[in-house]
Amino acid sequence: MSNYGLKSEVSRLEAELREIERKNNQLRSEIMSTVNSVTQAEQELSNYNQYIRNTLDHAAGTINNSADRALNAYELQGQIDQLYTRYKCVELANKKIRTLNNKKYYDFNNYRTVRKIVQGMMDNLDLNMVSDQIIYKSIERQHLQTPDFWLTSALISIMAWRNDDRILADRAVESAVKLDRKNSSIFFMIFNMRMGRDQAAVKWFMEYQRCDLKGSDENTFLMLFSLISKTLSDSVDEETSRQITDFIHRFMVDCAKKEGYSEEEIVDIIRHKMQGLMKTDSYDLPALAQYCKDYNDIIRMLNLAGNNFNILEFILKIKNVPAEEKNTYLKEYLNDLLSRPNSVEIETYNEIEYNELIIRLSGDVETAKKTFEQEQQRKESELNIISSMIRWIYDFGNEDVKGQMRLNMFSLTKTLQQTAADSYFSSYREMYKESHPVQILDYSAEVDFMEKAGEVNKVETYYLEQQNKELSSVKNTIAYVSFGAGIVCGAAAFFVHLFLLAGLGIGAAVGAGTMISNNFKKKNIVLKIQKQKSVVLENLQKLFDEFSKMRAIYRQFDEVSGKIEEEFVKL
């Protein structure tokens, strides 16, 4: 093929190549456009998916909130229904109380009249404040209307006694006791006691002992025995007073046994109550805190001993009952005694109490019923008061327990309280020791804080032994072996080769270096031991000083126990 033909072919091929490249560029542009379109579509799809997801999440949240609101509304509706039911119960209880109070006022008017007459007489102790004719006329009328009321018979007996009518007085007393032995015994005891007839009061005290004591007699029991012991202390012979005191103690021990406690367990309970008054304090005893291993026991002992101040303050607080409270206590109790319902009234009074409990509990009938039944069971159960008494004594936050009542209970349990206090004193005294385990640096020993010189000698001996032990561990054996090897090498050099003279130098150098190093070590050991001993002796002196300080604090605290015992004697 000629050159021209070849060039033509090349030109044709180049044209075809350019055409192919153009088509390729066009195709590439279309592909790119397609890719961009796909990418844009994918982005739009993704955005739309996100929009749908957000819309669904919002819808789900709205549905959940709606469901929660529906549940809350349903729950609120239930509470409203419940409150409405309780409101109706309160309203019904109010209606019943009004009806029952009307019954009390009209149906039991005769009993109320008798109570007013007796209460007026007991308040003034003046039997001449109203003429006998008027009183007798009222009594006769009331007795005809209330023949089943023990207080009417008691009133008749007082008026008969006033007019020296022994036969009528005895018959009226017999009738009152027959109708209600327990309340009659209490009433006649208080009446004779307030009239200054202590021997007669003792007789009714003995009569009361023969009654079955129930849970409802708690306050009566406390008041009676505290007043008896106080009122008769100056006018009754020592043997009678001792018998009364022994009876009180035996009764409480018997009650405790019925509750499952022995006398020792009661004492232990009281001791823990006394310990519960303790406040945790810290003391400035840094050396003891750092070096004494049983420092926590020392601090606990100090806190227990320091608690004597709290116990003394507690007893003084109990004994400090205001005079006005002492004067009104008996009157308040007497008012309560006279207002107690009799057998005819009791059902109405219980119904009023039950409905008042419903109102107090905002219409919660189930709880009111359960609480009322428990209280009735407590009133009818045997009198077991020892646990309650101990709890009441030590709980000043209980507003139901007044100061006079708390003092009475504390007086009744005086013997047990004294025994518990003695046990408490012994508990921390047993913890007091004059020797304690001490750890100062590497020195550990049982230090007798009453033998300072001996403890110093123990430290001196210990560190002398430590020094000798460590010094003996520093050996010059290597030095002696090195010297010996050097001498052998030096002697052999004359017979074998002069090169061995180097061994003589090396042996001498190693031996001398070892000797110098060991001497340096020994000096360091002596210095270290002396420094440790000095630190130990210095801190040991601090320990002795602080122990003396601690012992003075302890003795100051322990001396308060004597004041506590004095208060028990005065009680």
Image: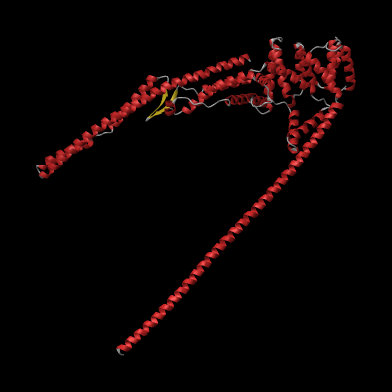
Determine the image quadrant of residue 361. Answer: top right
The image shows residue 239 at horizontal and vertical percentages of: 69, 11
Residue 310 visible, this orientation = yes
Determine the image quadrant of residue 13. Answer: bottom left
Instruction: Kindly give the residue lying farthest to the left in the view shown.
Output: 494
Instruction: Kindly give the residue lying farthest to the bottom in the view shown.
Output: 1
- Taking the spot 55% from the left edge, 26% from the top edge, the residue there is 279
The image shows residue 346 at horizontal and vertical percentages of: 81, 28
Q: Is residue 382 above or below residue 492?
A: above
> What colour-coding does the image apply?
secondary structure
Number of disc labels: 0
Which of the two residues, 217 or 404, is positioned nearer the viewer here?
Answer: 404
Q: Is residue 71 above or below residue 364?
A: below
The image shows residue 529 at horizontal and vertical percentages of: 31, 28
Q: Quadrant of the N terminus?
A: bottom left
- Taking the spot 79% from the left edge, 37% from the top edge, the residue there is 91
Q: Is residue 511 left or right of residue 448?
A: left
Q: Is residue 555 left or right of residue 206?
A: left
Which of the two residues, 77 or 33, is positioned nearer the viewer here?
Answer: 33
The image shows residue 536 at horizontal and vertical percentages of: 36, 26
Q: Is residue 510 left or right of residue 456?
A: left
Q: Is residue 100 above or below residue 502?
A: above
Residue 178 visible, this orientation = no
Q: Quadrant of the C terminus?
A: top right
Determine the image quadrant of residue 541. Answer: top left
Which of the two residues, 318 or 180, is positioned nearer the viewer here?
Answer: 318
